[in-house]
Amino acid sequence: MDKLAVAKVKRTQKDYTLGFKLAVVDSVEKGDMTYKQAQAIYGIQGRSTVLVWLRRHGKLDWTHLPKSQTMPSKETPAQTIKRLERELADAKAHNLILSKVVEVFENDYGANGQKEVSYGILWKLKTDKQISLAQGCRLLSVSPQAVYQHRIRQHDKASKLAVLKDWVQAYRMLMPCIGGRKLYWLIKPKLIAHDIKIGRDGFFDYLRAHRLLVKPKRSYTKTTFSKHWMKKHPNLTKDAPAPIKPEQTLVADITYVTSKQGVHYLSLVTDAYSRQILGYHLSDSMPATEVVKALEMAAHRRRYTHQAIHHSDRGLQYCASEYQEVLRAHNITPSMTDGYDCYQNALAERVNGILKNEFLLYVCNTMSELKQLIDESVYVYNNIRPHLSLNMRTPAEVHDSYSCPA
């Protein structure tokens, strides 16, 4: 975790994960930010670092820009549209704010809160040279000393919170779309150690102010073909209690992922108790000979010897003799959904969703590049990303901490 203790140190291209690079490229090309804004928001070092990422991973043609140029000379059409939309929305909001200022002062602020707001307004008017501080203080019946003290408090608070951005950026490099609650949980020990008092709501306000909130994405595509002649196995998990130990129940599923080379398929085998991904395999197609490689990886990584249940949908890959032979060889009992009902294999679907909605967000150029992104994502998912269902522990922590009964 030394990588997460971010200081102002020199970084190289190897210090940034592929997922982080793709997130920055996507934001720049959609017009959410410019080169300069991306480097400032994420603390990216190197004048041409983002340009290199855009040329290597971007969907637009960035080759016409000179190598020495690190900022486009004009806005892109997408940036212009977004700017105009923001300006229009800001103008409407500004009129609404002005009409409510007096009401807010009268109803929503106590005496101390009203003074704090007044101090901020007076300092802003002084900075803009619209009125002198002395005149403003006289009109509002406050002392210049109180305004300066307010300014010092605000400056001290901003200085103390500045380190938050480095901590957030460190985790964003590994998990570009991790949720705010999990991020707050990861950073909370650092807040305590540095005596920084900020609650979860305040932390969300900080993320929002620095454009570090994420928007979840949803997608779904059916990959299961269950109308085949091969034997289907009964659902052993339907009325069974939740697993009480690792490797008691393994859940498997297949999901599609894409690169610029086409559609690929990711097979996953996950432990239902710890949520740890034990096996995974990326392939260009879905024959049983490819899907079974994820099961073989999971079987090789098992740490406990008790018998296990393997639960999946009724896809022909899982019913195939190649797959069933590997299950028998490792003393694993097959279990399948009653029909095509994703809720009977909900945990596997959930893991698919986490990988695709938080990690595999952007289209890679090649299948090899996609495999690298998947390797990084599975490692972070297993070892760094906390789970709400695990009381904010990681899957690897839960899996490894189990003690077998004597």
Image (cartoon, helix red, strand yellow):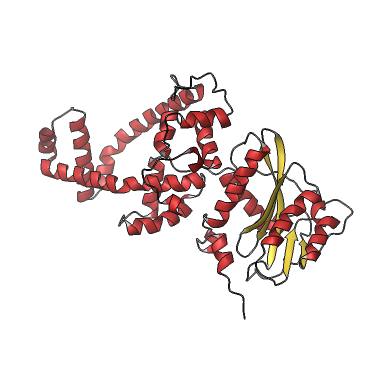
Q: Quadrant of the C terminus?
A: bottom right
Q: Is residue 166 found left or right of 299 in the rendered image?
A: left
Work out whether 25 lies above or below 223. above
Q: Residue furthest right?
A: 229
Whole-percent x, y for residue 396 in the image: 57, 61
- Report the number of discs: 0
In front of the other: 50 or 182: 50
The quarter of the picture where residue 400 lies is bottom right
Whole-percent x, y for residue 29 in the image: 52, 29
Whole-percent x, y for residue 48 in the image: 45, 29
In front of the other: 297 or 170: 297
Say if residue 38 shows up in the picture. Answer: yes
Work out whether 216 lies above or below 134. below
Work out whether 246 lies above or below 214. below
Q: Residue at x 24, y 47 (%)?
A: 156
Work out whether 71 lies above or below 384. above
Say if residue 31 shows up in the picture. Answer: no
The quarter of the picture where residue 338 lies is bottom right
In front of the other: 206 or 66: 66
Whole-percent x, y for residue 223 in the image: 75, 46
Q: Residue furthest bottom?
A: 406
